[in-house]
Image (tube, rainbow, N blue to C red):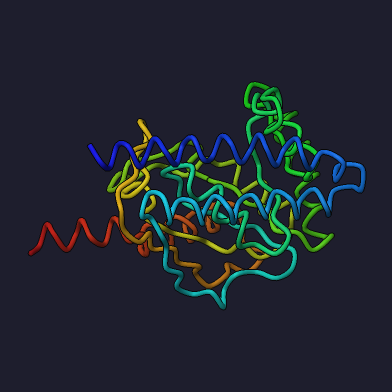
Amino acid sequence: MIRRIRSAAFSFYLIVTVAVMGIVCLPVMLFGRGPARATVKLWSRLALFGLHQIAGVTYKIEGAENLPQGGALIAANHQSQWETIALYALAPKPVMVFKKELKRIPVYGWWAARAGNIAIDRKGGAKALRAMTREAKARAEAGEQIIIFPEGTRMKPGERGALQPGVAGVYAAMDAPCTPVVHDSGRFWRHPGGEKIPGAISLHFLPAIPPGLDRKEFLRVLAARLEGARPDLIASEKAAHG
C-alpha cells in the first residue's frame, strides 16, 4: 500500500513539474533550441530528484567515461520512461527521437519540439526514415548526441527484443560513433502500471562502436554488446544457475 501511494505521489509530482515549468518558462522558447534544451534538462534532473526523494528509486552509473561529449549515437535498451529522462539529463547535448504523436500533447509536446528533439512518423515508411536520418546526421555534425531505443518498444526485465533495422540506417547516415547503453530500469519503474520499486537502477555506458561498420556487422555488434551487458539478463542468468 505504501509503495502504491509513493508511486502515485511521484506521478502527481511529475505532472505538476511539467505543467508549472512548462508554462512558467514559456518565454525561454523565444531564445531558441539551446535554452529550451537546458530547461528540459533541468526538468529531467528534477524528475530524477523527485523519483529518489518520493519513491526511493535512485541510480548508479558505470562507464561514465564512455558518455560521448561530441556528435554520437546513443543506443539504449528500453524498459520504462526512466531512461528517456535519465539519458536526457546526462547527455551534454541530447536529442531524443520520439513519436510524432507526442507533439500533440499540450506543454510536453511544445517543449519536445522546441528543444530540438526529432519527431518520427512511424507510419511514414521509408520517406519518414530518410528524413529522420538526415536530421540525425546534421545534429551529429553539430556535436549533439542522438538518443534512440533500437528495440522500438519497451521490454520487460529479462525479455530480449530484436533490434529494429532503422538504427543501422541512422548509424550509417550519421557516420559517427555509437555508444551502447544498458540498464535495468524496468525492475524499479514497472511498465505497464508505473509502480515504483525502491532501489538503485544500474546504468552502464559501454565503449563506443566506431563508425564505418556495414549494416549487418553493426547490428550484430550492437546486439551482442547490449545483450551481453544488460544487468537484468545477467541477474536472470545467475539466478538460473545458482
Q: In this view, does 151 lie above or below 227?
A: above
- Camera-side residue: 223 or 230? 230
Question: Whole-percent x and y of residue 200?
Answer: 35, 61
- Outermost residue, right side: 30
- Camera-side residue: 241 or 60? 60
Q: Is residue 76 left or right of residue 237?
A: right
- Camera-side residue: 183 or 89? 89
Q: In this view, does 167 lie to the left or right of 234?
A: right
Image quarter of the C terminus: bottom left
Q: Which residue is drawn at 39% across and 51% down?
A: 185
Q: Which residue is drawn at 64% across and 62% down?
A: 91
Image quarter of the N terminus: top left
Q: In this view, does 42 lie to the left or right of 241?
A: right
User: Toward which corner of the image does residue 189 lie, by quadrant?
Assistant: top left
- Outermost residue, bottom side: 65
Question: Whole-percent x and y of residue 76?
Answer: 51, 53
Q: Residue at x 16, y 63 (%)?
A: 238
Question: Whole-percent x and y of residue 16?
Answer: 58, 36
Q: Residue at x 76, y 51 (%)?
A: 37
